[in-house]
Image: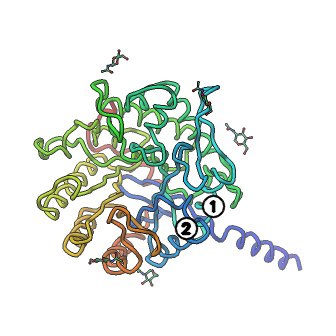
Amino acid sequence: MKSLTLFTLGLTLLSKVVYSLDFVKRCGDQFVLNDKIFYFTGSNTYYLHYKDIDYGTPKVFEIAKKHNFSVIRTWAFMDQAYTQGNVYYTSFNNVTREIEVNEGENGLQRLDRVIALAEEHGIRLILTLTNNWADFGGMEQWVRDFGFKEHYQFYTEPEIKKSFKKYIKTLINRTNTVTGKKYKNDGTIFAWELANEPRCWGTNMGKNENCTTKTITKWLDEMSTFIKKHDKKHMVSTGEEGFGLAGVDSENDIYGFGDGNDFIANAALKNIDFATIHLYASYWGFKDFVKEGRQYFEEHAKAIKKLNKPIIMEEFGVPKDKLEEVQPAYMQSLVDNGYNGIMYWMLAHDEYPDYDGFTIYDKNITVYIDDYTKIQKSKSGKKISSLKCLLKNLETKGDHKNN
Ligand SMILES: *[C@@H]1O[C@H](CO)[C@@H](O)[C@H](O)[C@H]1NC(C)=O
Ligand SMILES: *[C@@H]1O[C@H](CO)[C@@H](O)[C@H](O)[C@H]1NC(C)=O
Ligand SMILES: *[C@@H]1O[C@H](CO)[C@@H](O)[C@H](O)[C@H]1NC(C)=O
Ligand SMILES: *[C@@H]1O[C@H](CO)[C@@H](O)[C@H](O)[C@H]1NC(C)=O
Ligand SMILES: *[C@@H]1O[C@H](CO)[C@@H](O)[C@H](O)[C@H]1NC(C)=O
């Protein structure tokens, strides 16, 4: 009887935690899940929290699960100025001059639901905390709210940084209203990401001479350190595109430092766990998509190896008329260059319009992604001891100062 009770209790506990996802951690230049090396594919879906959350959002997770995607990147920001369907996360209080957080049903409870659905489908999330671009508010909205004029002031004005930290802390300390878990204890969150594509200039505000790579590196350092102070379990990354890489092609803007990014300095920061890159060959004026794309992947993989950290290709979009030629070449090159995570832009459910021409829907995932998901999976699973991991994280192969 006694053992039966224990057995039943065990079952009850098991059934309660059946969907709990363990934390993915960094081990040297690898991701590790349950002491095993972890490579993955995934995608991006920015609209999970506000568009059709009852139908579209579960559909996205079903498609992702069907194709064995491990990670989806989505927005954990949305300002009242860009409210969609009455949903927003933050607003400016012009009396107290503070950013207020909306924890209601039309606020962070939407993010709760997205995280709960992700967990239910066994998928982890990269949660991005603000946007370099005007979509959904982002940096420039906050700069305007506080009465400033320059894009870079998001990175430098004490009042804005204080509010950003308040927002971060609210998320980290939040208890999910669906799962009952604290965000900071939830392995469904793969990583916090400081910003989508942080640069010195944005949608409506240009570059100011006061903004240099140091401006952004300093901000990334301060904010990643702040997150790690309050959340020791989750990884943190930058969300940058990979600009600013010396010694490749100084004539080419994407390797230059003019937009305010120093890829190595940022990836080397002590509280940044992994590097990210993005690639849009059609926007960036590539003449030879395949050749120039491969070079971009190779050079960043080479650079990050020296830092002993993992790297994720987080966003890349190929126009439909080039998909057949370019997508497999990109996927193969990313695999060959050891990218720990490969995520394309973007995944949507079938009924969602292809606004930017880069959406790869369910059917084409089978054509263009599945083979590489299998390869990433086959590279995963090798056991690694925790002690070895600790040592690996201490190894620094290059000599890179943080600032
Ligand atoms: C997904 O994983 C399952 C289990 O390992 C496998 O049977 C299936 O073929 C995989 N599907 C794809 C699309 O990778
Ligand atoms: C503050 O916001 C209110 C409501 O939107 C508006 O009426 C008022 O003019 C604003 N005050 C300032 C100082 O911007
Ligand atoms: C964290 O959340 C709890 C409630 O879940 C609250 O009592 C506490 O004040 C919060 N702490 C911080 C530092 O925000
Ligand atoms: C650069 O920053 C300084 C000090 O805050 C300020 O006085 C100056 O006006 C800024 N320059 C520009 C071009 O905004
Ligand atoms: C699938 O990819 C092909 C290119 O191979 C493209 O022409 C087609 O429009 C895509 N289908 C959808 C639904 O996006």
Q: Earlier in the sequence, mark 2 or mark 1?
A: 2
Mark 2 closeness class: few <14, some 14–19, many ≥20 residues within 10 Å? many
Q: Amino acid at mark 2?
A: Thr
Residue pointed to by mark 1: 113
Mark 1 closeness class: few <14, some 14–19, many ≥20 residues within 10 Å? many
Q: Residue at x 42, y 47 (%)?
A: 237
Residue 320, quarter of picture: bottom left
Q: Residue at x 14, y 42 (%)?
A: 247
Q: Which mark, by number, is residue 287? A: none
Q: Quadrant of the N terminus?
A: bottom right
Q: Nearer the viewer, mark 2 or mark 1?
A: 2
Label 2, secondary structure: give it. Answer: helix
Vertical arrangement, residue 42 with respect to residue 204, above or below: below
Q: Residue at x 42, y 70 (%)?
A: 381
Q: Amino acid at mark 1?
A: Arg
Residue pointed to by mark 2: 57
Q: Quadrant of ligand 3?
A: top right
Vertical arrangement, residue 335 with respect to residue 213, above or below: below
Horizontal and vertical percent for residue 186? 60, 56
Q: Quadrant of the C terminus?
A: top left
Q: Is residue 57 left or right of 201 when viewed as pictured?
A: right
- Number of dots carrying numbers: 2
Give the spatial CA distance, label 2 vs label 1. Answer: 9 Å
- Viewer-nearest residue: 212 or 269: 212
Judged from this view, the residue extending furthest toward the right is 1
- Viewer-nearest residue: 224 or 277: 277
Horizontal and vertical percent for residue 386? 48, 56
Residue contact at pointers 2 and 1, CB within 8 angstroms: yes
Residue 206, quarter of picture: top left
- Viewer-nearest residue: 65 or 396: 65
Horizontal and vertical percent for residue 240? 34, 46
Q: Residue at x 46, y 39 (%)?
A: 224
